[in-house]
Structure formats: C-alpha cells, structure tokens
Image (cartoon, grey):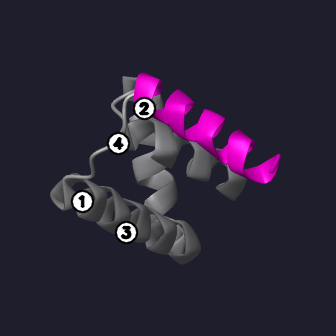
Amino acid sequence: MKCEEAGHVCDKNQYKEANFMERVRLTIHLIYCSACRKYSFNNNKLTKALRKSNIKTISETDKNALKEQFQKEMNK
C-alpha cells in the first residue's frame, strides 16, 4: 500500500467506512511507515478533539437569513 492510499484509508477508517481488508492493509502499512503512523495519530487526535468540543451549527433557515442580510448590507 502506498502512503497516499494509506492516508485515504486512514480517513475512511476514522468514519467507520473502511472495510476489513483495508483496515488490515492499513495496519500492516502503519507498522513500517512512521510518517503514516504520525498522520494517523494526529488524525485520531483531531477527531477526538472535535467530538469533545460539542460544536453547534446554525440551521439552514438561519444561514439563509444571514446570507440575505449580508447581501443587503453589501448592496448599500
């Protein structure tokens, strides 16, 4: 497995989208590739931080209202 593919599988694995063989191949790759191990570690750390942060987003209705308000202000 090339590092580029390992990065892609690592991303998929974090979101529970990687199949069994991809996970096995990634694990083998991570045994001998320190760069990908570091990428995987940092990726996991970022995902955990985002989950802990409890980020809230605005609704589509509120977002559209903000866009309209910005457009009105910019057109003055």
**Residue 38's x, y, as percent?**
46, 74
Do the residues under discs 3 and 2 have CB atoms within 8 angstroms?
no
Circle 1 residue:
48
Taking the image as shown, residue 67 lies to the left or right of residue 30, namely right
- Tell me the distance, in whole angstroms, between the alpha carbons under discs 4 and 3: 27 Å
* Location of residue 2 with respect to 63 vertically, above or below: below
Q: Amino acid at mark 1?
A: Lys
Q: Amino acid at mark 4?
A: Thr
Instruction: Say whether disc 4 or disc 1 marks the residue closer to the N-terminus.
Output: 1
Q: What main secondary structure does the magenta stretch of the protein show?
A: helix
Label 2 SS: helix
- Tell me the distance, in whole angstroms, between the alpha carbons under discs 1 and 3: 11 Å
Nearest the viewer among 22 and 59 is: 59
Check residue 41 in the rendering and tell me which mark sits there, or answer none: 3
- Tell me the distance, in whole angstroms, between the alpha carbons under discs 2 and 1: 28 Å
Instruction: Say whether disc 1 or disc 3 marks the residue closer to the N-terminus.
Output: 3
Q: Amino acid at mark 2?
A: Asp
Q: Which residues are magenta?
A: 60-76
Question: Can residue 18 be seen in the rendering of this structure?
Answer: no
Circle 2 residue:
62
Q: Which label sits in the foreground, 2 or 4? A: 2
